[in-house]
Image (tube, rainbow, N blue to C red):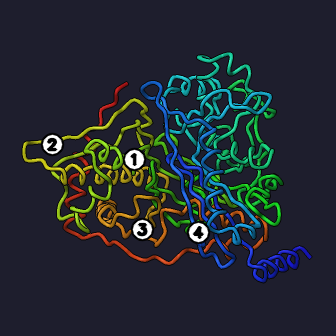
Amino acid sequence: MAAMSWKRKILDAQASGLMYLGIDLGTSAIKIVLVDDAQRVVASRSRSLTVSSPRPGHCEQDPAQWIEATFATLDGLKADHARELAEVEGIGLSGQMHGATLLDSNLVPLRPCILWNDGRSFAECAELEQRWPTLRTTTGNKAMPGFTAPKLLWVARHEPEIFAATKLVLQPKAYLRLVLTGEAIEDVSDASGSLWLDVVSRDWSDEGLAATFLSRRQMPRLVEGCAPSARLRSEMAQRWGMTRRPMIAGGAGDNPAGAVGIGAVNRGAAFISLGTSGALLVPTETIAANPERVVHIFCHAVPDRWIQAGAILSAASCLAWIGRLLGTSEAELLAPLGLRPKAPSPVSFLPYLSGERTPHDDPEVRGMLDGLSHATDRDAIVQSVLEGVAFALADCRDALADTGLVIAEADVIGGGSRSRFWLSVLANVLNIPVHRFADGETGAAFGAARLGRLAVTGEAIDAVCTAPQRVETFEPEPALAQAYAERLPEWRRLYRPRR
């Protein structure tokens, strides 16, 4: 009967032209895609967000921004696609991971959200590992400032009145869900980025919560990413002209959602995320932790799967930085470079603008341009920025290899995937083929829409989470790959710990 039930839902959806929304709460923008039952993107919209840095190494965001941007984007979508929006049956959420959104007893934020790239809680990481000796075996990760748990220790020490008033701790997309549904719910992929989750049991660790003076009472309820969580509030469904109250899926952190969007749900489907931050990620059916080399373990957005990842804190944001510095757009920076590099740039760039995770776990290290001369031109600097990010991903590749994961090829998603030159650099630095999709920059939002569909229909995961067609493959060139292999040790020697 259960099988017939979801099959009937599929047939009903196909007959009535039901739609699905994917909402991706990123660091730099809210992105929303509207997807039909044939998995075609009918419309997409985005709205920019801003980040504040009240002190060096501090990165925060006002949660009110997320709500305003989401509502404005959906209002715009209704203006242009009211008929399609009316047929939305399921909604999926994806979001930036690790942020600490602290709410009072009235569910009002007590302070700006402390973001994933905030480095203030380094001392608290050491304290947390002392207070919780089994942290690494339970979470599969090392305590680092990016995670949520150390941030709460920092708040307890430096803002005790706010900590005392904290009744609920949510990560960004869970706060968005709270506003949309009135329910405090989190999916296990995002929860595993908090450093409070037992990644094997996929449940909160009471020991970990106690180590940060918290309990389950201050945590959201957990669900799998493709499972139903709660329905959209009736007044919001009416605002956007929806004929029914859509079900909102558990959803996922941005990278697990991106994996769902490109069908990377089974073992070995490696991919690179080139967004504001960057990562090299591999879905697995088992856990092979390597916290000493800062390899992350996260629950996947689908049951009985995990993701192992090397993560870098600055990727496409490095290109945005050099654009701001030189007073021009990213497109104008990239255009003169052509389609492929002829040789490595004579300039070297360390992309540690916000510190670094894999493999250094160093929130205090900063970026560097090395090898400048009177002959250095803009193109050499821009190329070095792209190469620096690629070299950092080579560090991630080698850290993953220490766990036994050998990567033979990789798909690329995120805004950086639009640059053919950058993908050619990646192919040659990593010495593997890399593949591009037509709409790779919307991968997380599209993956969220797929999760929204699964929560409604109960379809088989592999039937929905298929891989989109690759539109281009970038193969390494032997001579160029060798030149980058010789440059990589020199690049690595530039790193100097600041502590």
Mark 4–mark 3 distance (CA, rounded to whole Å):
34 Å
Question: Outermost residue, front direction?
Answer: 79
> Does residue 17 lie above or below 317 as drawn?
below
Screen quadrant of the N terminus = bottom right
* Residue 139 disc label: none
Q: Which of marks 3 and 2 is nearer the N terminus?
A: 2
Q: Which of marks 2 and 4 is in front?
A: 4
Q: How far apart are marks 1 and 4 (CA)?
A: 26 Å
Question: Which residue occupies 44% across, 58% down?
Answer: 415
Location of mark 2 (residue): 371
Q: What residue type is labelled 2?
A: Gly
Per the image, the residue denoted by label 1 is: 317
Q: Residues within 10 Å of mark 4 (few under 14, many from 20)?
A: some
**Regarding mark 2 in the picture, which secondary structure is present there?**
loop
Give the image location of residue 111, x and y in percent: 63, 27
Residue at the (23%, 40%) spot, across then down:
369
Question: Which residue is the site of mark 3?
Answer: 408
Query: Which residue is found at the position 53% from the left and 39% from the top?
Result: 116
- In front of the other: 179 or 473: 179
First along the sequence among labels 1 and 3:
1
Q: Earlier in the sequence, mark 1 or mark 2?
A: 1
How many numbered dots are placed on residues in this image? 4
Instruction: Tell which of 443 and 152 is nearer to you.
Output: 443
